[in-house]
Each structure stands twice: as C-alpha cells, then as structure tokens.
Image (cartoon, rainbow, N blue to C red):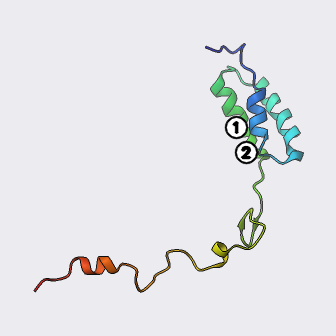
Amino acid sequence: MATSYDLDPEPLISRLAGPLLPADRQAFREAALDALTRVPCAGEGSIYRAVATLQRQFFHPPAETHHGVGSRRPSKLTDGPPIGAEDPRTGGRNRHRFKAVE
C-alpha cells in the first residue's frame, strides 16, 4: 500500500498535460505543482481531484469545422442525408404485425 510519502504526482501530471496544447502544458505543470503544495492530505484521490479540476481550466477544445469536430475533408456521411430518415419501406413489418384476421 502506498503512503503519502511514496506518491509521485509526476506521472499523473504528465498524463493530464497530454491533451493540452503545447503552449499550455508548462503553465499547467507549474499550476499543478503549486496546487499540490496546498493539498492538506496528499493521498491518491486528493491529488487527482486537485490536478484534474485544474486541468479543465487549461483545456481548450478544438474548433468545429463545417464537416464536424476535427474533420479535415468532406465525407459522404457528413454531406449526405441523415441515416434513419423515413423511408416508405420503414416499419413495414410492424404495420402488418397486428393485422385483423377475418
């Protein structure tokens, strides 16, 4: 079992800094280390909560393009009609399921 003396927050900080923009990573690392100096009980959970909530302040999601999030080129799926659009054949089996028997 790990004690508060055995915990190394560096792997957690590195993992949470990964999705950030390169310009924000160093600022996040400094803020995370500063926040950890103010955590009263340095357990795994308290370290994660302090650093994870801080990461949200530095995360900037990618801008959406007209083709969807992160897409760089046109696609038949994004340009075509919605899948599941009503079709005359849709529900044919259900329409005949409860047919009155004479």
State the residue at coordinates (63%, 27%). Answer: 45
Question: Quick one: quadrant of the N terminus?
Answer: top right
Mark 1 neighbour density, 10 Å: few (under 14) some (14–19) many (20 or more): some
**Figure quadrant of residue 29:** top right
Q: Amino acid at mark 1?
A: Ala
Q: Amino acid at mark 2?
A: Arg
Q: Which mark is residue 60?
A: none
Which residue of the protein is positioned furthest toward the left in this rendering?
102
**Figure quadrant of residue 75:** bottom right
Please tell me whether residue 45 is drawn above or below residue 52 in the rendered image.
Answer: above
Disc 2 marks which residue? 56
**Figure quadrant of residue 5:** top right
Please tell me whether residue 74 is drawn above or below residue 37 in the rendered image.
Answer: below
Measure how far apart labels 1 and 2 are at the Cα level: 7 Å
State the residue at coordinates (56%, 76%). Answer: 82
Disc 1 marks which residue? 52
Question: Quick one: quadrant of the C terminus?
Answer: bottom left
Is 10 positioned to the left or the right of 43 in the image?
right
Please tell me whether residue 76 is drawn above or below residue 38 in the rendered image.
Answer: below
Looking at this view, is 5 or 40 the one in front?
Answer: 5
Looking at this view, is 10 or 43 the one in front?
Answer: 10
State the residue at coordinates (72%, 71%). Answer: 67
Please tell me whether residue 34 is drawn above or below residue 95 in the rendered image.
Answer: above
How far from the left and from the top, in percent, is residue 57? 76, 45
Is 54 positioned to the left or the right of 84 in the image?
right
- The reply to whether dot 1 and dot 2 touch (C-beta < 8 Å) is yes
Mark 1 residue element: helix
Mark 2 residue element: helix
